[in-house]
Every structure is written in C-alpha cells, then in structure tokens.
Amino acid sequence: MFRRIAQMLAIAVALLVMVGFGFAEEAAAAGKSWGYYVGIGLAIGLSAIGTGIAQGRIGAAGVGAIAENRELVPTVLLLVVIPETLVIFGFVVAMILLGQ
C-alpha cells in the first residue's frame, strides 16, 4: 500500500515538474522563473493529493458507520466535504500567485 502511494506521488511530482518546464519560455518572457510556476502547480497538486487521501479514509469509515446507523448520513457527508476545502485553498493560493 505504501509503495503504491509513493509511486503515485512520484508520478504526480514528475508531472508537475514537466508542467513547470512547459511554462518556462513564457515565464522567461514575463521575467519569472520556472520555479514560480512549479510552486503554483504544487499548491494545487499537493492539496489535491492530501484531500484524496483524507476523503478516502473518511469515506471508508463513513460507509461503515452508515451501514450500522443510517442516521449518521448527514454527519458523514459533512465530514467527507470538509477536506475538500484544502483544494479550494490551494486553488485560491494559485490564483493569488498568478495575479501577481
């Protein structure tokens, strides 16, 4: 399980770095380094990875709780939605950085 997660993280980081190199020419013209755009990609990408891990674990536990007691559906739904704010914050940070 850990090996699979490590492989997926390595692929995600590699893709983010490639996106950064893709913007390198535009960044040079704008006077910003390619690392600036890699940072923006990491802000969104890492927050999405963290959200996926959290929602997977919360969702699995929530399904078990709902199977035992159906009255827990609103609570579990709220707990699954809360980690999604991490991606929203990552997106907001990326938009702020792109606006500079």
Image (cartoon, rainbow, N blue to C red):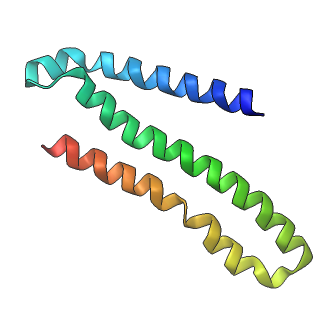
> At x 77% / y 67%, what residue is drawn?
62
> At x 18% / y 22%, what residue is drawn?
33
On the image, which quarter does residue 64 sit in? bottom right
**Which percent across, then down, holds residue 20?**
32, 22
**Which percent across, then down, holds residue 96?**
21, 49
- Left/right of residue 26 with respect to residue 77 in the rendered view: left
On the image, which quarter does residue 7 sit in? top right
Q: In which quarter of the image is the C terminus?
A: top left
Q: In which quarter of the image is the N terminus?
A: top right
Q: How many labels does the image show?
A: 0
On the image, which quarter does residue 73 sit in? bottom right
Which residue sits furthest front? 2
Q: Which of 25 and 58 is in front in this view?
A: 58
- Left/right of residue 100 with respect to residue 37 in the rendered view: left
Which residue sits furthest bottom? 71
**Which percent across, then down, holds residue 8?**
63, 28
Determine whether 21 is above or below 76 in the image. above
> At x 55% / y 42%, what residue is drawn?
49
